[in-house]
Image: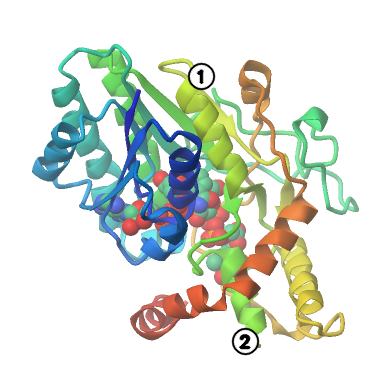
Amino acid sequence: MKNILITGGAGFIGSHVVRLFVTKYPDYHIVNLDKLTYAGNLANLKDIENAPNYTFVKADICDFEKVQEIFAKYRIDGVIHLAAESHVDRSIKEPFTFARTNVMGTLTLLQAAKQYWNGNWEGKRFYHISTDEVYGALELTHPDGIEPPFSTTASSSEHHLAYGKDFFYEDTKYNPHSPYSASKASSDHFVRAFHDTYGMPTIVTNCSNNYGPYQFPEKLIPLFINNIRHGKPLPVYGKGENVRDWLYVVDHARAIDLIFHKGKIADTYNIGGFNEWKNIDLIKVIIKTVDRLLGNPEGTSDHLITYVTDRAGHDLRYAIDSTKLKNELGWEPSLQFEEGIEKTVRWYLDNQEWMDNITSGEYEKYYESMYSGR
Ligand code: NAD
Ligand code: DAU
């Protein structure tokens, strides 16, 4: 495969995947298709934008004719599909946008790929990037009194220090709760249906929460880093008891590279950090790290924690078991969480201009309207 279409490459995870493929595979042509919604930002790719093996195309994945044109013009033989509406809170306010992009957009891409490949599946691949949220929510069953940080290596995947005894496995039944996860679940089913019905060589992966550079500051970690820097309140939903499993975004990109090249057709892999945190414990680590790196005495920003009304339908706990990926393809997270969070906080503090360009003007107004009246 030489001509790879990456959708959503101007977003958070997509930009890391584009960077990895453009730099690691000089003989591939990487075509980045992105609509540049509020979440798409070409500044995320400044360092590789002039690479000879890279092309950016501004387009909507729901525009069938345009997508057909892109397949033909660039003779696409592999797709890595990341374009999506990705924020749960937005999906609660505007579910139609999520159904349009995540469901219809994915179907549009599948249909265009099917037409262009025309039954010649040799050397072709349609790889769909999905989320652990499709599995629903897990209970908190572990006895109290065990404090993070937990292990971040698959070798200790017995999870003996985690918050519960259950995990999401590849065969866990789908049970999405938010409009976001319902739309992602639907798109996963369409991708599998195109394999089962037409024989298209598809792969689906379901990943846990990513963190790292270039994440849009509506998501917990960049939002909180920026708010601490500006002395603004940190809105903790509910009691801050919800648990997420955090993975450094570059490790997700590494997994995508490996699975795209070595993954089994029609298969599914879970990707996770082996790194569960209660939100409130994670928030305390972020506060401590930002204060330290800004040279403030410990405790300076603790007062910013503000408990607010919970997210509607807030899933209690996500926890991925990615043992299959480790056993079959040898992947595991390369970064310990302590190192990853330090790098991440440092990156946002060092790239204040990137952040300010996003948080000024129109976006700020939209953000305020989203969160007022919660
Ligand atoms: P993001 O919101 O940062 O980026 C999404 C990108 O898609 C943006 O560049 C946006 O412009 C583009 N896009 C949106 N609608 C489009 C359309 N109609 N046509 C073309 N482009 C469009 O999202 P992200 O966090 O980087 O997530 C990328 C993918 O990974 C998504 O499919 C998401 O469901 C999945 N995922 C994300 C996480 C996470 O923690 N962020 C975890 C697991 C899976
Ligand atoms: O699990 C994978 C998913 O992770 C991805 O599929 C999604 O695209 C991605 O957005 C992320 O979803 P979450 O809803 O878990 O991420 P978010 O950063 O929005 O929230 C993380 C946790 O923090 C969640 O329990 C809600 C809570 N939270 C979030 C925000 C923005 C707060 O308490 N306060 C906040 O202001």
Which of discs 2 and 1 lies nearer the camera? The answer is 1
- Given residues 47 and 233, the one toward you in this image is 47
Going by the picture, which residue comes out furthest to the left? 65
Q: Does residue 245 appear to the left or right of 48 in the view shown? A: right
Amino acid type of the residue tagged 2 in the rendering: His
Q: Position of residue 98 (x, y in %)?
A: 31, 53
Q: CA distance from mark 2 to mark 1?
A: 45 Å
Res. 244 visible in picture: yes
Q: Does residue 66 appear to the left or right of 205 in the view shown? A: left
Res. 85 visible in picture: no
Residues packed near mark 2 inside 10 Å, few (<14), some (14 to 19) or many (20 plus): few
The quarter in which the N terminus is drawn is: top left
Whichever of labels 2 and 1 marks the residue nearer the N terminus, that label is 2
Q: Which residue is mark 1?
A: 262
What residue appears at the point 36 percent right and 22 percent down from the top-left corner? 202
Q: Position of residue 332 (x, y in %)?
A: 69, 32
Amino acid type of the residue tagged 1 in the rendering: Lys
Q: Which residue is mark 2?
A: 230
Residues packed near mark 1 inside 10 Å, few (<14), some (14 to 19) or many (20 plus): few
**Considering only vertical position in the picture, is 244 above or below 367?**
above
Going by the picture, which residue comes out furthest to the front? 52
Please identify the quarter of the rendering in which residue 253 is found: top right
What residue appears at the point 19 percent right and 13 percent down from the top-left corner? 119
Instruction: Please tell me whether mark 2 sits on a helix, a strand or a loop.
Output: loop
Q: Check whether the beta carbons of the residues at disc 2 and disc 1 lie within 8 A of each other.
A: no
Q: Position of residue 133 (x, y in %)?
A: 51, 44
Q: Does residue 193 appear to the left or right of 261 in the view shown? A: left
Q: Position of residue 218 (x, y in %)?
A: 49, 68
What residue appears at the point 13 percent right and 24 percent down from the top-left corner? 115
